[in-house]
Image (cartoon, grey):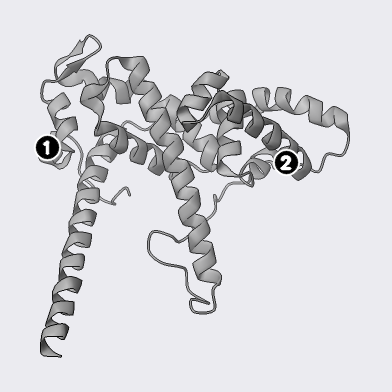
Amino acid sequence: MRPEGSSAGPALGRAVLDRVQGVLAGGSWGGVTGAGSFEVFVAGHSTALLRTAHLLTGDRGPARDLLQTALIAASRRWTAVPDSAAATALVRRELVAAHTSRWRRLRIGDLLAESTLLAGTAGLPGFARPAADAGPHDDLTAALLRLPPRQRVVLVLGYGEGLPEATTADALGVPAEEVRAWAVLGLALLHRLLGATDAGAEDALPARLRRDLPARAAGVVAPEDVLDDVLDGARSLRRHRAGLAALAVFVVLAGLVVLTLG
């Protein structure tokens, strides 16, 4: 979603979503007033959120796209956010939703590309699987990427970030009981994917996750132009939707012409 060669700074102006612009132009929430509220949140929380996205995707490029998508989605309800904690929870929910949605699109794209009608193609636009991370993955990261998305979310948030079950449940929009069940299933599957055969290794897996996941994410730092990504992404999203609307109108008109002439 991040366009190449995008410009930065106030020149983007009206490109951002209307509700975000209301906040940037003088809205307020949680004691943060004036034009700084959204910028302050992005500056103060982007690195932590990007680290979560990186653990979910295993790659910095998709992680940055995931964060951009989550911030744009959260911006639509930004004026209703009462404080920083609520803002963090909102963006975390959007991050998780974007992650599971991305996984579904990639799965659909794989099925389309493997079909006899589309054999030899890269799939449809928006569904093609991106190139793999050029850097090597350790065995734990590679195994995590093979988990179903919700199980991966539960392990990343619970062990990588040390969040309580209730917070993870809020991010997923499910009861805490489901979080516990997915954690058990995720740990069992991860144990098998790692090729471990003894029960001791399975018992030690949670401790390994608590140690290794934060260490892997520690080197991830959000770039200074995250806010520009959000502004550019909002503008690109509007253009994309306008193009889809124009295409739909064209198809309807073409159908009416065919019916009329027929």
Judge by depth and name the residue closer to the eye, 59 or 109: 109
The disc label shown at residue 82, or none: none
Q: Is residue 16 above or below residue 43?
A: below
Label 2: state its secondary structure.
helix
Q: Position of residue 43 (x, y in %)?
A: 32, 23
Residue at 80% over, 26% down = 203
Q: Tell me if mark 2 has few (under 14), some (14-19) or many (20+) residues whose alpha carbon lies within 10 angstroms of its own.
A: some
Pick out the residue farthest to the bottom.
262
Q: Which residue is mark 2?
A: 189
Residue at 32% over, 31% down = 224
**In this figure, what is the number of numbered marks?**
2
Q: Position of residue 202 (x, y in %)?
A: 80, 31
Q: Position of residue 177 (x, y in %)?
A: 60, 26
Quadrant (top left/top right/bottom left/bottom right) for the C terminus: bottom left
The amino acid marked with disc number 2 is Leu
Q: Which residue is mark 1?
A: 13
Judge by depth and name the residue closer to the eye, 61 or 250: 250
Label 1: state its secondary structure.
helix
Judge whether residue 220 can be spotted in this image.
Answer: no
Quadrant assignment, res 31 = top left
Q: Is residue 100 above or below residue 42?
A: below
Judge by depth and name the residue closer to the eye, 95 or 80: 80
Q: Position of residue 37 (x, y in %)?
A: 22, 19
Judge whether residue 257 can be spotted in this image.
Answer: yes
C-alpha distance separating marks 2 and 1? 48 Å
Q: Is residue 251 above or below residue 161?
A: below
